[in-house]
Amino acid sequence: MKPEQDNEAPCPLGLPLTARCLHCRYLLRGLVKPVCPECGRRFDPEDSLTYYNESINLWRRIWGAPPPKWHQYLICGIALVVLLDISSPGNLAFLWPCGLVLILGISVVDYGLRCTFRSKDTPNPDAASQLPTKRKNAWLVTPICLVIMLGIVLFPWPFWLRFQISKHAFEQKVKEVVDQGPMPSLELDVWLGSMHVESVYELAPGVVFFRTGSCDLFDSCGVVFLRNGTTINTNSLEILSPLGGNWHEAVMPFN
Ligand SMILES: [Zn+2]
């Protein structure tokens, strides 16, 4: 018969009193480290799937666990796609709103359920300090991604940042276009810094539009250089957020 601890022993890891080792069924009550002293198997006090407890039903065992790897990879993958998509106007403009909705959905359903059941299964807050760092970090991935995504809604910083990195190349191209004199359009399909530019239009003296993609079936998205004091026809160009200096995000409607 296996040796077991005193039934009245405290439970410093915050485990349920009836928790047992998954492998050898040793009673885990009273332990100060998340390792079974009988067989050496590690367990996570915050993850009810890593120990056996007949008083916890399967539903709570599954949903009380920290977000698994698939959850973390999925959230990070979608966040990365959203960041890349929003960092250059046009092309797959539908992608980032879909990504945002997906992340919100996963957070509310999967993460929300886990948070709800987690609080029921870990009455002892000191248990968190005993967790392996990886398991603790699993709880952080979703809120961090959510904060980053909400930040994008308030200010599209990935686009701002990518343009700032590429700004020098854009300014060189403006010089070239102005030096070559008036022209209706110049097909390019090149990279300027870190941004892909499909074509350049000199709409008026001192107004140069760089098309980075399509906002929808007809309109072009991109950035525009506006020389100080230049007025533009709002039918030919819609100015959006400023990007610093003479630069703005802009939409060129189909004419
Ligand atoms: Zn064991």
Image (cartoon, helix red, strand yellow):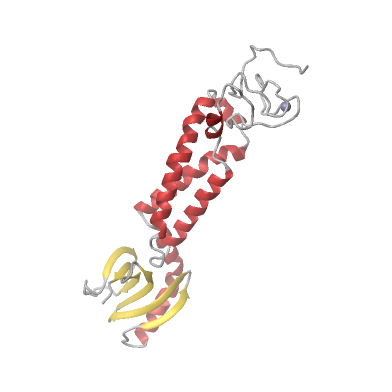
Q: Quadrant of the N terminus?
A: top right
**Residue at the (47%, 74%) spot, across then down:** 191
x and y percentages locating residue 162 in the rendered image: 44, 64
Q: Quadrant of residue 34?
A: top right
Residue 167 appears in which quarter of the rendering? bottom left
Determine whether 117 is above or below 106 in the image: above
* Residue 7 picture location, percent across and down: 65, 12
Q: Is residue 81 left or right of residue 45?
A: left
> Image point 47% across, 35% down: which residue?
113
Q: Quadrant of ligand 1?
A: top right
Q: Position of residue 185 (x, y in %)?
A: 34, 83
Residue drawn 41% across the image and 46% down it: 104
What percent of the width, then of the height, locates residue 76?
A: 51, 51
Q: Quadrant of the C terminus?
A: bottom left
Q: Residue at x 66, y 31 (%)?
A: 43
Q: Is residue 24 left or right of residue 180?
A: right
